[in-house]
Image: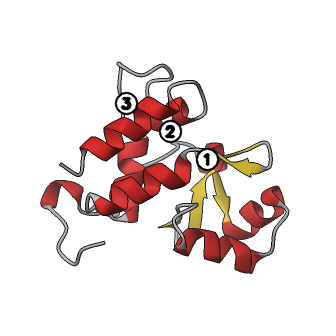
Amino acid sequence: MTDSVPADRAAPGPESAAGPADAADWLTLPDVAERLDVSISKVHQMIRDRELIAVRRDGVRRMPADLVANKTVLKHLPGVLNLLADAGYDDEAALRWLYEPDDTLPGATPAKALAGDQAREVKRRAQALGF
């Protein structure tokens, strides 16, 4: 990740809430550890390795619940997170990109499409952001 992030990719202000609209749709890191049946240390490592994404909401690191389905991380999420980081997106901007409505994708957001058969298309679009 670079030190200077383009203005259109910078983290949103505190009034912005990228991700699920409802607080019930967010998981704390201990919740993620429980859902994945791993230690909290493993969750922190997964975030450092860009296998998961977490942002602060109300002073607590959280992640959208729909990125962890059926006791596993969505298959293509780590690849997309790495592509977005390579394109200069910080965690807030990456999360905003994942939840930006896109009528050309089934499910209307890249995050929802990752859970379906359009995951490779989401990955291709994330890769194109680096060019």
Q: Residues within 10 Å of mark 1 (few under 14, many from 20)?
A: many
Looking at the image, residue 118 sits to the left or right of residue 70; the answer is: left
Specify the label residue 67 is tagged with.
Answer: 1
- Residue 61's place in the image compared with 109, above or below, is below
- Residue 81's place in the image compared with 67, above or below, is below
Contact between labelled residues 1 and 2, with CB atoms less than 8 Å apart: yes
The residue drawn where x is 34% and y is 65% is 90
Q: Amino acid at mark 2?
A: Ala
Which residue does the numbered mark 2 point to in the structure image?
111
The residue drawn where x is 17% and y is 48% is 131
Looking at the image, residue 25 sits to the left or right of residue 112; the answer is: right
> Of circles 3 and 2, which is in front?
2
Q: Between 130 and 55, which is closer to the camera in this rendering? A: 130
Specify the label residue 101 is tagged with.
Answer: 3
The residue drawn where x is 72% and y is 80% is 41
Q: Amino acid at mark 3?
A: Pro
